[in-house]
Amino acid sequence: MDNTFNAILESMKTYFRGVRSEWGKINWPEQRQVITETVFVVAIVFVFTVAVYLMDIIFKTALGFLK
């Protein structure tokens, strides 16, 4: 049992050493790029939300005439 625990502990240490090594290789985007892309995503979500809401109103009205 002690041997299994040590093996698990060693593999965890190896994993986190690899994570630390790879962390330095990450190419982080510039702050301006992050802000620009975030605004773009929020705008697209807003446009699609309004479009779905308008379609909901249109279909609800159209189906109301069928009653």
Image (spheres, rainbow, N blue to C red):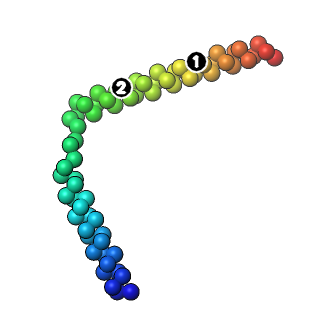
**Picture coordinates of residue 47 (x, y %)?**
46, 21
Is 8 above or below relative to 43? below
Q: Residue at x 20, y 35 (%)?
A: 30
Where does the image place residue 24, in percent across and percent down from the top left? 18, 52
Q: Secondary structure at mark 1?
A: helix
| Quarter of the rendering occupied by the C terminus | top right
Q: Residue at x 25, y 68 (%)?
A: 14
Task: Check contact, mark 2 vs mark 1: CB within 8 A.
Answer: no
Residue at the farthest right position: 67
* Quadrant in which the N terminus appears: bottom left
Q: Is residue 66 left or right of residue 17?
A: right
- Circle 1 residue: 54
Q: Residues within 10 Å of mark 1 (few under 14, many from 20)?
A: few
Q: Is residue 28 above or below residue 64?
A: below
Q: Residue at x 75, y 16 (%)?
A: 64
- Tell me the residue that label 2 is attached to: 40
Q: Amino acid at mark 2?
A: Phe
Nearer to me, 64 or 27: 27
Secondary element type, mark 2: helix
Q: Amino acid at mark 1?
A: Leu
- Residue at (22% x, 34% y) in the render: 31
